[in-house]
Amino acid sequence: MAVNLEAYDTTVTEGDKAIERPTKLHGRRMIYTGEKEITRANVVQVLEKAYAIHCLNRREIIYLQNYEKGLQPIQNRTKTYNDYVLNKIVVNIANEIVTFKSSEFAGEPIQYVSRRGNSGVENEDKDVPKKISRINDMMLSEDKQAWDYELAYSMFTCGVAYRLAWHDKGNGPVADYLDEAPFELAVPDVENTFMVRYRDVKKTKAMGVTYVTKDDPKGEMEFTVYTPNVTYTITGMPSKGTGKGGLKITNEVKHNFGMVSLIEYPCNPDRIGAFEIVIDLLDAISTTLSNQEDGIEQFIQALMVFDGIDISRNDFLSLKDLGAIKLPPAPAGSSGSGRKLYYLTEQLDQSQTNSLVNNMKQIVLEIVGMPSQGNASTGDSSNNGAVIMRNGWWHAEGRAMQTQNMWKRSETELLKIILKICNDTNELTGLKISDLEPRFWRQSYEDLLVKTQSFATLRAAGMPAVQAFKFSHLSRDPESDAIMYDEYQEKLAEELDRMNGIGGDGDELPLNEDNTVNPESAEGIQAQVEGEEEPPKQTDSEGKKGQVAQCPVCGRKFIKKESNQIYDSLSCANRGRRSTPRYGG
């Protein structure tokens, strides 16, 4: 079943006007070169060979992009019989898969967080959290969240996507003022981009390539080739082994990145799209539903059979207009039972068809790792964890973790370029790759109460605030929130010290804001015992925090820090518990 891609995609070049599905869809091919180094002398030759392999990938990429948009083989469906009833229904589950996975993976901003926090490592830079927060601000100014989503969408559709980073040279003081980042980010079209690697054990990147077709009568192409130290601009037409055309270097710019600034983001090790492995099932679902609609339409448009009845054309047309027919009298001596008037129908079993479609769709969701949406009961008492396990959300999370690990490797390459640019421009220095890592925000179905309790438990165990925010998933920007949290804690500690009289010269009695003696100080306690001054209640008389109480062990008066506080100190509490008899003697 052929699909005319050219009618929907005007960017298809002369060599890519294939209208049939590629015979094999098993992921995108990796492109290698046998050269030891890319130089001006061999870059054109390497580009020619690599482009020929890229054209095979490009044909598959364009097919998958159009398939996800709804241009699917069912639209070229044909029938041998009864072709007057021909429905072509596209059940675009491919779009559903790509949209779900992209939204789940990159719907929330992917933030950079500290890998250590305040870990106490000797000679550790204490400004790392602030520097990481600065990196996040730069990424925000470059709309990285939107770029991430666009990149994820292409990655889940085509199996691979690309990102480009380069120096932001600026266009004057106004542009410098508005632009907070010394770099630029972009996501080039995946069908016009490819990566070439060396044939070594690490599959080291040799060069990255993007290209466009010029808007001129010749239709020449302009390639931009990114190597670790040089960026080449090459124009012309690839020969593709025909000996015609030719490419030539038109520009050459040196840089000091020391790495290829084009980063490749594979969806998985096989570089296969999210719906590519179930594309045959998706076609079968569309075909089944189209046949089901044909059966319904053919039942409605059934033929009328005149068995043993002679009727003229005019009488039949009158029948259609009036909706009724008068049969002629039976011949003399016959019973007339041999004459019949009925519709020729054979109705499709709708229940079996629906069951088949539902089964196929469930298989698709299980293979691609998506949660079930319509079969689970919502009226039971299952908690979040049970629903997550039962409805397949845990399976979806496992697939997202697989993609996340692949993404982190590519994101590390991006960070190397970004930190290099920031260091060269003195925008941000001293930050290392080992200081930070990307944090992905998913699992928004967790209760806020669980997150806050987890945060409090981690803090009570002595974990730094930035790490507690990160592991409890309470904050979407742990670095910034940890800085605010620490500042608040410092102010709170200073206020408590002031109230307790810590830090003064000791010549005057520690006072409260209303100039009364602080009841928690030694002088205040003595004043309470002697009755010189009745300590004020910090709140009302209903036993809330701040009420004055007397310790049953030491007899001293104190201000309650909690409404259920009984003892003045921990030592009094231990003595009081030991002196209290247990139940049963």
Image (cartoon, rainbow, N blue to C red):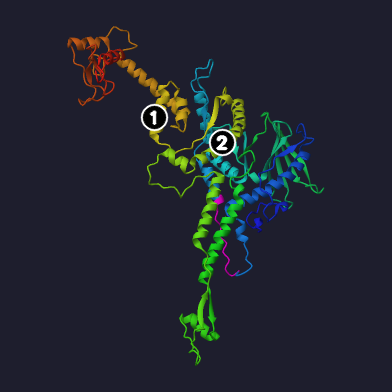
Q: Which residue is mark 1?
A: 453
- In this view, the residue farthest toward the top is 507
Q: Amino acid at mark 2?
A: Gln
* Residue 76 image point, x, y percent: 63, 61
Residue 355 against residue 512 in the figure, above or below: below
Q: Earlier in the sequence, mark 1 or mark 2?
A: 2
When asked about the image quadrant of residue 434, the answer is: top right
Give the number of marks.
2
Residue drawn where x is 52% and y is 59% of the image: 353
Quadrant of the image for the N terminus? Answer: bottom right
Residue 294 against residue 389 in the figure, above or below: below
| Mark linked to residue 404 | 2
* Residue 326 image point, x, y percent: 47, 85
Left or right? Give the position of 302 relative to 45: left
Query: Which segment is the magenta one?
Result: 83-94
Q: Let me know if residue 7 is in the magenta part.
A: no
Left or right? Give the position of 199 relative to 70: right
Residue drawn where x is 56% and y is 63% of the image: 291
* Mark 2 neighbour class, 10 Å CA radius: few under 14, some 14 to 19, many 20 or more: some
| Marks 1 and 2 close (CB-CB < 8 Å) | no
* Mark 1 neighbour class, 10 Å CA radius: few under 14, some 14 to 19, many 20 or more: few
Q: What secondary structure is the stretch in magenta mostly built from?
A: loop
